[in-house]
Amino acid sequence: MAIKIGKKIKGYSVNQPDDKNRHDSSVAVAPVVTTAEVIQMHERVERPEVLVGATYKIKSPLFEHALYVTINDIVLNQGTEHELRRPFEIFINSKNMDHFQWIVALTRIMSAVFRKGGDVTFLVEELKAVFDPRGGYFKAGGVYMNSIVAELGAVIEAHLRMIGMLHDPDLDPEQRQLIAEKRAAYEARAKKTAGPSSKNSGAAPSDSAADNTGGESFPASATLCNKCNTKASILMDGCATCLNCGYSKCG
Ligand SMILES: [Zn+2]
């Protein structure tokens, strides 16, 4: 059957022999084809004898003893292009047994979520949003933790980043440059106000001095950024700018 083309042709592609099938079966068949050879995470995936993992230490002023969080991963489709490393189970150990029943309950539920498959990254946000009514605490580098549970969320986040299931929200180069400029201007101003007398004051903490708590350092006078929960927000010309994530608010 001849078809008369009335409009301008803007683009074209050549039909492949299997194109017709793909077209007709639309979305429904495609996943079935892939699951036939690629193993996806779900409850019936059996635990291998050996799993790889990492153990993280959580030290909080709210707990007398450190918590040790172990997350073990399963590697699916190893050696193929569909190789996927996913968290499989989580354990928490501590000398402190006060909260043990809740910790066991939480880790069992989280492990079950891991094994269900699908998107597990929501756990990070859920946990990080848990507030301790007694108040949170600052971590090294000026990151504020709402609670121990929130720090557990941060640990899982770090782990998911390490295995490539979460990615750093990349700042674009312009934003990076803006942050660097803001920082330079702020530090220059802080130096000026400190004056030459600060030279002789020896150990007196200067405003631009990095707090030696590890991680990326921000000016000591920086306040908590509401977006990234890091003590990195500086006030310049009536605008608060975060030197960590670039969040800016004026007025
Ligand atoms: Zn921020």
Image: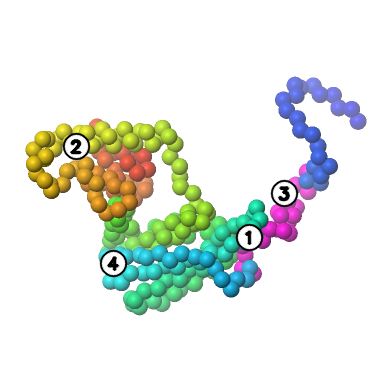
Marks 3/4 in contact by CB < 8 Å: the verdict is no
Residue denoted by label 3: 27
The disc, 3 or 4, on the residue closer to the chain's N-terminal end is: 3
- Which amino acid, mark 3? Val
Give the position of the C terminus as an image quadrant: top left
Q: Tell me how far mark 4 sits from mark 1, CA to CA.
A: 41 Å
Q: Position of residue 143 (x, y in %)?
A: 32, 53
Q: Note whether ligand 1 is within 8 Å of mark 2.
A: no
Residue denoted by label 2: 190
Q: Secondary structure at mark 2?
A: helix
Q: Note whether ligand 1 is within 8 Å of mark 4.
A: no
- Which amino acid, mark 4? Leu
Q: Is residue 79 left or right of residue 21?
A: left
Q: Secondary structure at mark 1?
A: loop
Vertical comparison of 216 with 7: above or below: below
Residue denoted by label 4: 62
Foreground tag (3 vs 4): 4
Residue denoted by label 1: 78
Q: Tell me how far mark 3 sits from mark 1, CA to CA.
A: 27 Å
Quadrant location of residue 130? bottom left
Quadrant location of residue 16? top right
Q: Is residue 41 magenta?
A: yes
Label 3: few (<14), some (14–19) or many (≥20) C-alpha neighbours in 10 Å: few
The disc, 2 or 4, on the residue closer to the chain's N-terminal end is: 4
